[in-house]
Image (tube, rainbow, N blue to C red):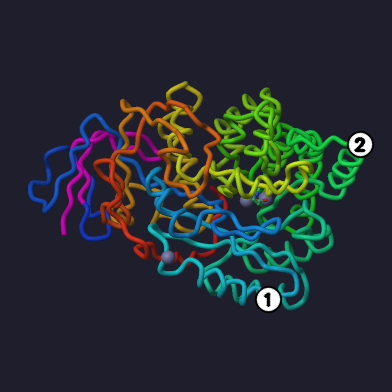
């Protein structure tokens, strides 16, 4: 089966060129000047459109147990929504429950995801119980294609790890070449602020933001960086939201330390004002770290330009407003933490291109190429080049995406961007050579997505 994507502007992290892309079966066979290839079984006209490597969302939570409920997207619905939005790979998190083993956790997540995903997927492992057994098991996870481990400085009593536990896991990461991913918020101090707010009768969603001040994200980020320095481990700060944390990352990187960070669209586009919406609507915007005052956004965009922020992932973790966010009415600390987003990351980031905040090539780099490099998928993913998987998005910069819960494909009853009109639209999506989105219709299938066993990370991106 030969598919020819004709006349588009092929955009890689290295730049853009008008070219034809020839796909044979599941892979990209060749990229050449327009008109070089003559015959194909199928031709996709990409004139006037961008041809980009499929998005890679390195931070999603499908069917994640949290706060007594589960995030609302299954691997089937969540990966289908991803495809609609031009994301052809997700890396989700297997979550170790305290008292259970990493390998049984991995089995459990394979059961949830295998044969259900519409696009390719991999796993990181959340380590919430550091002990001799789980540290040893990190090696087995690596052998099983899971070589990045998330830890939490937040959520005492749930996922929280002490500095000593983090240190031990980092030592293991140094020994094995694995990556430690860090949720960097000072959960011990935050829990005190939360208890004080509740005791004082301050129970609205906005308090979620006010009790998790940016200083405590900055502090935890600095502490994680120092622990990584002492142990020699590479460190990836997830969902960075505050300029305080960004400053710590920038300083470490300037000093040559292997520290990387991602941010998320919600921190680039939304703010504490959304959390403060009346009538409990703010609950839609409860995620951790919280949305920040608007003036953090310029710093984050700058971080994306300077590469102190190397990746944009969604932290997609949807909870329905009516049934699930409701759990925290009258007590913001019981609102399940997380926001939907997997479907709109590519479009939202494209607004940064339209607004001159990042270049076209940088859009592709932070949304696809760097996550591929960072997590051991490159050059199979993250690039339009011969030999790469034919995960390709034909993107129409002239069309408009209307965002609404009425029309989105995520299994959640609200959109954090309800009514937004975004410049640009996903036109056609190929996942390993198969057309999964075209003509405003889904042509994929549950189970098409394959598990990606990842090679040891390539850190020096
Ligand atoms: O609020 C969030 N971010 N929920 C998902 C879990 C996490 O910490 O990433
Ligand atoms: Zn299914
Ligand atoms: Zn987190
Ligand atoms: Zn997350």
Question: Secondary structure beneath disc 1?
Answer: loop
Task: Give the magenta range.
Answer: 1-22
- The dot on residue 200 is 2
Mark 2: is the Cβ under 8 angstroms from ligand 1? no
| Quarter-of-image position of residue 387 | bottom left
Say if 157 sits above or below 261 in the image: below
The quadrant of the image that shows the N terminus is bottom left
Say which residue appears at 56% left-offset and 33% top-offset: 304
Residues 60 and 5: in front is: 60
Question: Secondary structure beneath disc 2?
Answer: loop
Residues 110 and 226: in front is: 110
Q: Horizontally, is 348 left or right of 215 in the view?
A: left
C-alpha distance separating marks 2 and 1: 40 Å
Residues 340 and 104: in front is: 340
Say which residue appears at 66% left-offset and 24% top-offset: 294
Q: Which residue is mark 1?
A: 101
Say if 249 sits above or below 149 in the image: above
Q: Is residue 3 magenta?
A: yes
| Quarter-of-image position of residue 161 | bottom right
Q: How many marks?
A: 2
Please tell me whether the stretch drawn in magenta is mainly helix, strand or loop. strand
Q: Give the crowd class for mark 2: few <14, some 14-19, many >=20 residues within 10 Å.
A: few
Say which residue appears at 82% left-offset and 49% top-offset: 187
Q: Earlier in the sequence, mark 2 or mark 1?
A: 1
């Amino acid at each position: 089966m030969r598919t020819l994507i004709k006349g588009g502007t092929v955009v890689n992290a290295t730049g853009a060129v008008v070219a034809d892309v020839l796909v044979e079966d599941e892979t990209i066979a060749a990229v050449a000047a327009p008109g070089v290839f003559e015959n194909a079984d199928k031709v996709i006209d990409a004139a006037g459109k961008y041809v980009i490597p499929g998005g890679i969302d390195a931070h999603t939570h499908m069917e994640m147990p949290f706060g007594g409920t589960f995030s609302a997207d299954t691997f089937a619905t969540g990966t289908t929504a991803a495809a609609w939005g031009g994301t052809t790979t997700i890396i989700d998190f297997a979550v170790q429950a305290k008292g259970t083993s990493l390998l049984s956790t991995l089995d459990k997540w394979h059961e949830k995801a295998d044969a259900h995903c519409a696009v390719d997927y991999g796993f990181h492992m959340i380590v919430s119980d550091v002990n001799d057994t789980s540290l040893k098991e990190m090696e087995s996870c690596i052998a099983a294609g899971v070589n990045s481990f998330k830890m939490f400085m937040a959520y005492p009593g749930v996922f929280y790890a002490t500095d000593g536990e983090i240190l031990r896991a980092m030592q293991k990461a140094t020994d094995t070449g694995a990556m430690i991913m860090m949720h960097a918020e000072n959960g011990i101090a935050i829990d005190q602020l939360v208890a004080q707010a509740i005791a004082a009768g301050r129970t609205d969603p906005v308090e979620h933001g006010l009790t998790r001040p940016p200083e405590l994200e900055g502090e935890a980020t600095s502490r994680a960086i120092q622990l990584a320095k002492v142990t020699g481990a590479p460190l990836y700060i997830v969902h960075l939201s505050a300029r305080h944390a960004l400053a710590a990352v920038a300083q470490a990187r300037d000093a040559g330390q292997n520290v990387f960070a991602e941010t998320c669209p919600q921190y680039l586009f939304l703010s504490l004002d959304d959390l403060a919406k009346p009538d409990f609507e703010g609950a839609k915007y409860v995620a951790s770290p919280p949305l920040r005052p608007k003036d953090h956004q310029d710093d984050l965009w700058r971080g994306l330009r300077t590469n102190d922020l190397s990746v944009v992932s969604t932290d997609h973790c949807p909870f329905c407003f009516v049934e699930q966010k409701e759990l925290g009415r009258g007590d913001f600390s019981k609102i399940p933490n997380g926001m939907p987003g997997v479907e709109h990351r590519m479009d939202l980031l494209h607004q940064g291109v339209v607004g001159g905040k990042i270049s076209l090539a940088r859009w592709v780099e932070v949304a696809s190429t760097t996550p591929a490099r960072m997590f051991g998928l490159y050059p199979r993913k993250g690039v339009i080049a011969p030999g790469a998987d034919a995960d390709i998005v034909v993107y129409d910069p002239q069309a408009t995406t209307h965002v609404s819960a009425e029309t989105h494909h995520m299994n959640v009853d609200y959109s954090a961007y309800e009514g937004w009109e975004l410049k640009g639209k996903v036109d056609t999506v190929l996942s390993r050579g198969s057309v999964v989105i075209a003509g405003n219709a889904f042509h994929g299938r549950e189970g098409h997505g394959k598990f990606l066993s990842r090679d040891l990370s390539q850190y020096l991106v």
